[in-house]
Image: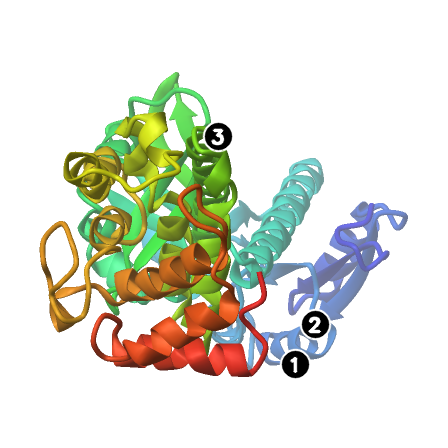
Amino acid sequence: MAISERGRKALILIVDDQRFNRQMIAGALNPEEYDVLEAEDGRQAVDIFFKKSPDIVLMDAVMPNMTGFEACRLMRAAEKDQKTTTPILMITALGDTDSINEGFAAGVNDFIQKPINLEILRRRLEIMIKEKKCSEEVRRSEERFRLLAENAQDFIVIIQLEPLSYEYISPVVETITGYRTDEFYSDPWLFHKTINHKDSFKLNTILSGQISEPQVFEMRLMHKLGHRVVVECHAVPVKANKRVIGIQIIARDITERKKDEVRRQIELTKRVLFETVRALSTTIETRDPYTSGHQYRVAKLAVAIAKEMELDLQSIESIETAALLHDLGKITVPAEYLSKPGKLSVTEFDIIKNHPLVGYEILQPVEFEGPIAQIVYQHHERNDGSGYPLGLKADEILMEAKVIAVADTVEAMSSHRPYRPALGFEVAMEEIKNHHGKYYDPIVSQACLDANRKGNLLF
């Protein structure tokens, strides 16, 4: 009858100063189930106990040199740091209350009276061995659980509901929340204090015992250092008599995963928006076959100039988007004005000059990442204030709008128009050079000239 995973029979230490009693007990035990050690007094019993680690001790109470009570106290002192203790069954003729109390105080598990009923003794041993085996299995199970819990990336919390207290919190909680386990044990409401107020109702629902089945939910926590942490929680109710008495929660930090999801969503939205912008740009230009591709070419030129200026990525993306849409307002201009071969009248030109405002009004409600509507509104403003529609000058004009103004001029002069043939790229460069600092911002116009010199303005 094996008692443990060590592959041996149960080892019984019989302690009695009467050899006859020791042999009688040993003879009553099945040799296939038990191995026996003998000691004739308490001192010898303690020595054997330390050396052999028996599974059960059968201890006489009254013996010379050292009594059973004294021996028990020494054995229990040696086991004070152990999670499980060795069962001790005291065999005694003493039946008074004081002796029994002294025995329990010394660490005795149970008593059996002399003269010994060997059948009762065998039954007691069987019960004690089963209890010890169960105790060891529970201990090993707890150790495995603790080892897994303390080395897992998830943190585990076992909560008793009435009264609210923590039965167990794994140490990884400090990594995720910044608070030590002892801070949680001392303050059962600490989780409430760390949870975002918009998510607190989820925890309240769980801790009120209202969930009857396992649930998965997300909660936002505030780390002790002040940053936000998103956790995915698996909550399992613990029931007794069909009533929820506790909750087991396994929580995982998914902050980076949520950030990745947000980033992917933003990138998808940006791609969809950019493709929509390009489609809209193409739609606008179908009304004027002479300027087909104008906005696309302006965007290419503007991006090249912005890169020469070493602008940040967000500004470059805003410039590209605004350039693709800068003539959106011409959608309200009659097509015959756009393709008129002769000179426009003052009235016709005034209508065309209104297109930056129309473009702004169309784009203003759209939530772009950059100030796209304002850039479109200002792309015909000039550094000296001679532009339209607002007559802004110098620093009153957005840098992105100044870049598009230069790129728009270069593309328009380099391309064919219904009222004139193409003037050529070199003429366009002369225009930028001659009006450097006057019509065009000096930094932008210089960047345009430098980019051209380096061969980066091809379109």
**Element under disc 3:** loop
Res. 161 mark: none
In the picture of the structure, the residue carrying the numbered disc 2 is 39
Give the residue type at disc 1. Asp
Camera-nearest residue between 146 and 24: 146
**Left or right: 252 as drawn, with respect to 127:** left
Residue at 20% x, 38% y: name it.
345
Q: CA distance from mark 2 to mark 3?
A: 108 Å
Camera-nearest residue between 50 and 119: 50
Q: Is residue 227 above or below residue 329?
A: below
**Left or right: 152 as drawn, with respect to 157:** right
**Element under disc 1:** helix
Q: CA distance from mark 3 to mark 1?
A: 103 Å
Quadrant of the image occupied by residue 438:
bottom left
**Left or right: 443 as drawn, with respect to 68:** left
Residue sitting farthest toward the right? 32
Q: Which one is closest to the eye, mark 2 or mark 3?
A: 3
Q: Position of residue 262 (x, y in %)?
A: 43, 46
Q: Position of residue 431 (x, y in %)?
A: 36, 72
In the picture of the structure, the residue carrying the numbered disc 1 is 47
Give the residue type at disc 2. Ala
Going from the N terminus, do you reach mark 3 or mark 1 first?
1
Q: Marks 1 and 2: CB-CB under 8 Å?
A: yes
Q: CA distance from mark 1 to mark 2?
A: 9 Å
Going from the N terminus, do you reach mark 2 or mark 3 first?
2
In the picture of the structure, the residue carrying the numbered disc 3 is 286
Give the residue type at disc 3. Thr
